[in-house]
Amino acid sequence: MKVGFNYGSYGDVSFLLYVMTQGKIHTDFYDPSANKRFEIHHQGDVFLFSPNYEDIVDCDKKIKLVSNDNQLTSYKDYDKTIVTPVDSIRAGYTNEDIQRFLDQGNLFLSMSTISFEHKNFVFYPLFSLVYHYYQLGYKFLNFYQNSNKHNLLGIYHRPTHIGGTRYPRRNYIYDQVKAQLGDDFVCYPSPSTDLDLLLDSYRFFGQWYNTHISSYTDYSTSVANIIFETFDSHGTYCYDSRLLISEKTLKALLFSKENIFFIWYGHDTFIPHLKDHGFWFLNFEFYDAKNNSEDTAVFDSLIKTTEYLRQLKTQLGGNETVYKYLLEKYGKHLERNSMLFDQLIHQCSISDQVISLIKQ
């Protein structure tokens, strides 16, 4: 079968390129007249991608790809539409809109949760790791595993988010851990003049976005680090159960290649997905899914882990000694994170499922 896809941006094609990662790409990368047209030959089928409808008009199926259209639309002259929201699903799409869109035979390929199930809604949370790995340039990083541990526990944190929103839950956790560890808990500094705030603010010039590729240099100075995911364990700031994991989890896993330990704090929904894939964070050693306390199981695991680090430093005497102890005890998990991440990037476990839906 020959299937034609009309696309406009990387976001539109991102999930499908991952699904077809084992296929063979056919195009002339150096011909300016090629006009962003390419083919992927995958398991006997030909998938033609082009920004121009005329290129795909003779295909057996013609599919419109979008990632962030203002409306959910069944486009004229196409067999179906595939939406790949590369963030949480926008609030402008009501559940009724999405249900109607899916019932018409269209597809969602989503890294974000939604509050109902549908056979044409493919939820794959780990795609977020793949998307941000390429979109934010993490594939260009190299790892050398050489640093001194100046801090016991480190974190990036601002009392007010760069977007202008206060995150009381994050501030509460920061204060709790600071009370436990004192000077052994370090917040990594960043420029904070009025000009910096103006340039960095998402409401103005958004230069904070550039820190996504600030590498692992700060993290590597600490024995362990805390990663705050976008949606906390209470689902704060989440619209209508539309949760996801972001580039923050990507960093915490990818930087296992540098033998950096992370405590992961996000929504408990994603812990089974991460664990089922074999991924590990230091607080998973203290995570009890049956813990139904008001502060949530993942919060309790964070606090227990910071207490564990404090006890280790008391017993062993220094940050370097604590790090060497953790590396000896848990280093195999970092090695496995690294191996599994490479595997995730190059093999899509739901490839057959998605291609079957496309060809229906």
Image (cartoon, helix red, strand yellow):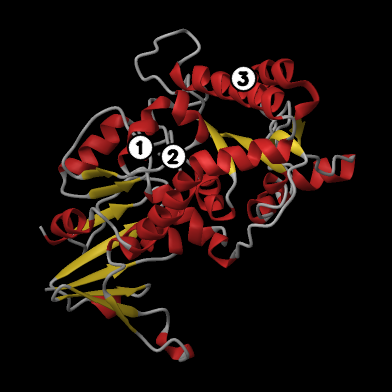
Q: CA distance from mark 2 to mark 1?
A: 7 Å
Q: Earlier in the sequence, mark 3 or mark 2?
A: 2
- The residue to which callout 1 is attached is 275
How far across and down, in percent of the image, does residue 207 sit?
A: 72, 51
- Dot 3: element: helix
Assess whether mark 1 and mark 2 are in contact (beta carbons under 8 angstroms).
yes
Residue type marked 3:
Glu
**Disc ID at residue 130:** none
Residue that lies at the very extreme toward the top in this rendered image: 294
- Asked if residue 203 shows in the view, the reply is no
Callout 3: 10 Å neighbours few (<14), some, many (20+)? some
- The residue to which callout 3 is attached is 307
Residue type marked 1:
Lys
199, 330: nearer the viewer: 330
256, 312: nearer the viewer: 312
Assess whether mark 2 and mark 3 are in contact (beta carbons under 8 angstroms).
no
Q: Locate residue 88: give its quadrant.
A: top left
Q: Earlier in the sequence, mark 2 or mark 1?
A: 1
Q: Locate residue 261: give its quadrant.
A: top right
**Disc ID at residue 280:** 2
- Dot 2: element: loop
Q: Locate residue 221: give its quadrant.
A: top right
Left or right placement of residue 302 versus residue 207 in this view: left
Name the residue: 78% across, 21% down. Answer: 182
Quadrant containing the C terminus is bottom left
144, 323: nearer the viewer: 323
- Dot 1: element: helix
294, 117: nearer the viewer: 294
Residue type marked 2:
Trp
Left or right placement of residue 127 versus residue 56 in this view: right
Q: CA distance from mark 3 to mark 2?
A: 19 Å
